[in-house]
Image: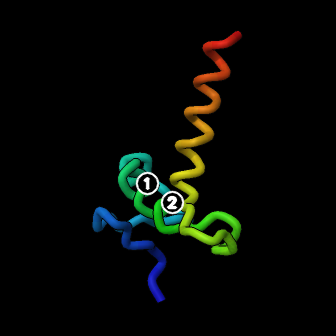
Amino acid sequence: MSDYILTYSKTKFYPLEPVREDIKIEDIAHALSLMTRANGHFKHFYSVAQHSISCCREAHIMSLTR
């Protein structure tokens, strides 16, 4: 068993010894796009990434109305 995670961008990421330069937004976005909200209990696929974007948009709209 390896002590690193091979990310989507082919970066060897060591969770117990993280290096800032090894954290890439593309890897985070890819992983979140594959994770389902509510453990897949929705009728249609709804990813954590989709939910995050919806929350960001809602927060932005709310900030404009204050």
- The picture quadrant where one finds residue 64 is top right
Q: Does 64 sit left or right of 22 as displayed?
A: right
- Residue in the picture at 48% in, 77% down: 3
Circles 2 and 1: CB atoms closer than 8 Å: yes
Q: Position of residue 5 (x, y in %)?
A: 44, 72
Which residue appears farthest toward the left when viewing the image?
10
Any mark on residue 8, and which?
A: none
Q: Position of residue 39 (x, y in %)?
A: 67, 73
- The picture quadrant where one finds residue 38 is bottom right
Q: Does 39 sit left or right of 2 as displayed?
A: right
**Looking at numbered disc 2 in the image, what kind of residue is underneath it?**
Leu
- Disc tally is 2
- Vertical comparison of 3 with 53: above or below: below
* 35, 18: nearer the viewer: 35
Q: Position of residue 31 (x, y in %)?
A: 46, 63
- Residue in the picture at 48% in, 89% down: 1
* 29, 42: nearer the viewer: 42
The residue indicated by pointer 2 is: 32
Label 2 to label 1, Cα distance in Å? 5 Å
Which residue appears farthest toward the bottom when viewing the image?
1
- The picture quadrant where one finds residue 41 is bottom right
Which residue appears farthest toward the top when viewing the image?
66
**Looking at numbered disc 1 in the image, what kind of residue is underneath it?**
Ala
Q: Position of residue 19 (x, y in %)?
A: 44, 52
* 63, 5: nearer the viewer: 63
The residue indicated by pointer 1 is: 29
